[in-house]
Image (cartoon, grey):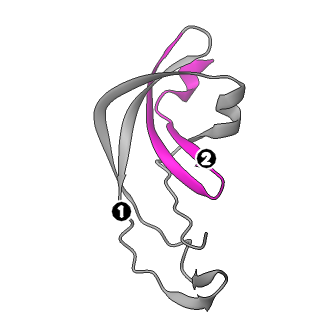
């Protein structure tokens, strides 16, 4: 089961934000995966704001470009109930910051 997710990317879902966790590099047992941690460097797209909402609204919030870097840190995770609610697998590294929240 876990072998098919090796090479995919794990991100943590935090309401409207998505934080990159890392790349799945291995599996162990029935529900265990090994993740190589990743860092995302700051979004480089210049944001356009107008007045509105709580204070401002970012017009190009969906135009985000992040650079990703693998670290040497390996962590183990178990796939379970919390996993399905808090983490998600992607084919590409995914990181998103909601500038409108």
- Quarter location, residue 34: top left
The relative height of residue 77 versus residue 44 in the rendered view (above or below) is above
Residue 23: x, y in percent? 43, 35
* Residue 91: image tag: none
Q: Under tag 2, what secondary structure? A: strand
Residue underneath mark 2: 13
Question: Which residue: 49% across, 54% down?
Answer: 95
Magenta residues, start to end? 1-28
**Residue 60 versus residue 82: which sits nearer the camera?**
82
Answer left or right for 74 relative to 52.
Answer: left
Residue located at (46% from left, 32% from top): 7
For disc 2, the neighbor class at 10 Å (few under 14, some 14 to 19, many from 20) is: some
Q: Is residue 92 above or below residue 9?
A: below
Location of mark 1 (residue): 42
Secondary structure category for the residue under label 1: loop
Asked if residue 1 lies left or right of residue 35, the reply is right
């Amino acid at each position: 089961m876990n072998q098919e997710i090796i090479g995919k990317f794990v991100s943590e879902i935090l309401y409207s934000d998505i934080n990159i966790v890392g790349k799945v590099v291995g599996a162990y047992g029935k529900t265990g995966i090994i993740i190589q941690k990743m860092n995302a460097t700051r979004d480089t797209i210049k944001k356009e704001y107008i007045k509105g909402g709580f204070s401002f609204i970012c017009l190009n919030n969906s135009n985000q470009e992040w650079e990703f870097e693998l670290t040497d840190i390996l962590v183990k995770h178990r796939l379970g109930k919390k996993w399905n609610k808090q983490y998600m697998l992607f084919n590409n590294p995914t990181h998103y910051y909601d500038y409108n929240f």
